[in-house]
Image: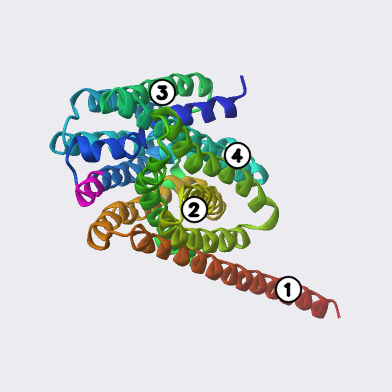
Amino acid sequence: MNRQLLLCLSRAGTCMGTMAFAGALPVLRSAWHMDAATAGSIQTAFNLSNAFALLVTAWLSDSLGAKRVYLASTWAGAAALMIFAIFARSPHTALPLIVLVGLTQGGAYAPALLLIADLSPAAERGRRMGQILAAASLGYLLSVSLSMWAASTYGAAAGFAICATGALAGAVLGQIGLKGVENRRYHHEPSVSSEPIRWRAVFGPTSLCLLVGYVAHCWELLGSWAWTPTLLATALRPCNLGAMTTSLIVGGTIHLSGMIATGVVGALSDRWGRARVLICVGAMGALCSMLMGWSEQWGAGWVIALVAVGSFFILADSGVLSAAMTDEVPAAYLGRVMGVRSILGFGVGAFAPMTFGATLDWTHRWGWAYMPLAAGGIIASLAALALRKSSQSIDAESNQSQSSIVDKREFERT
């Protein structure tokens, strides 16, 4: 079977644990007697542990190899989810256990991207990055849908157990898909290990624009992923739909459009340029975030439509930002740079669900709660605009330098 397909299926299975708590949240808030701030703090704990794991495993991927780190994380992720399913029975027990889940879920993210970057030619990197992120979105879709349905029908533990089974399947498929792939370790290359990484050289103007854009993207994305399932479930409640129908609508609306977005927009960035695509999707994501919360007062149809469109644009820049960073950073330093990027992006974004929950408790309006998330989209779009100007400036300097060399050669001939 095609290795890219196996890796995509592996990511889909592994990511079934990421949205398990968010999917069950509409049920858990009443079952565990949680206010919005408490629910948001549990999701924030997951995101913070996820961010820490992203840093550590991205860093270790340089010295231990991305393949080894990815496989270890996927197997550990399946075990952590099963432990969470068995022992999480209240906010107090869920909080430490979800930290364990976050550590293992985050551990597979950066190594997967590094593997794709290593196995893909530069001309196809955006498309293949988009495919692996689209596969992750499929896992999120299954996670939200199955967790919400099982929690509503059989209890939250059943939903968590189903997600753990999917993560186990992902670990098995990853083991098969990476069979025969070299576990490349840059730490043992003398030319690299003898020279410390020069952070100022690596994080030039272009990389800094990408870093700011990624942090803003994570803020908007993590806040939306944590709370949009509950917004949809709230909007659909008057429709008196069954648990299965509601869960499918919620999961499909949020993550099906995101799955399409990463594949399509990643390919478009290969053709049209990274900066141009990032400007457009950042601005559209911010606009949709502004409208999604207020649509709760307009009826379920408006909520579904705006969430579908918003989810498309909020996730669309994920693969493009990753592909652009791999274009800029030397392969020997990529793991460490991705680790720094991940801890900043997911570390800042970790507080978005808690900020959202606190705003919702304070204002009792979904519209106001989404406004802090929209700020992330605005900043991401501005960072992409700065990226485009920086790239144009670098290209102009390069052309001027080449022109000077040509003029000098012509002068010497005369």
Task: Determine contact: label 3, label 2, CB under 8 Å.
Answer: no
Please state the horizontal and vertical placement of residue 366, each as a whole percent of the image. 35, 57
| Other residues around mark 2 within 10 Å, as few (<14) / some (14–19) / many (≥20) | many
How is the rendered protein coloured? rainbow
Amino acid at circle 1: Ile
Distance, label 4 to label 1, CA atoms, is 38 Å
- Pick the quarter of the image with the N terminus: top right
Residue that carries the numbered disc 4 in the rendered image: 128
Residue that carries the numbered disc 1 in the rendered image: 405
Give the magenta range.
35-42
Amino acid at circle 2: Ile
Amino acid at circle 3: Gly
Please state the horizontal and vertical placement of residue 320, each as a whole percent of the image. 56, 51
Looking at marks 4 and 1 on the same chain, the residue that comes earlier in the sequence is marked by 4
Residue that carries the numbered disc 3 in the rendered image: 166
- Does the magenta run of residues contain 202? no
Magenta part, dominant SS: helix
Q: Residue at x 31, y 42 (%)?
A: 50
Q: Residue at x 55, y 43 (%)?
A: 257
The secondary structure type at the circle numbered 3 is helix
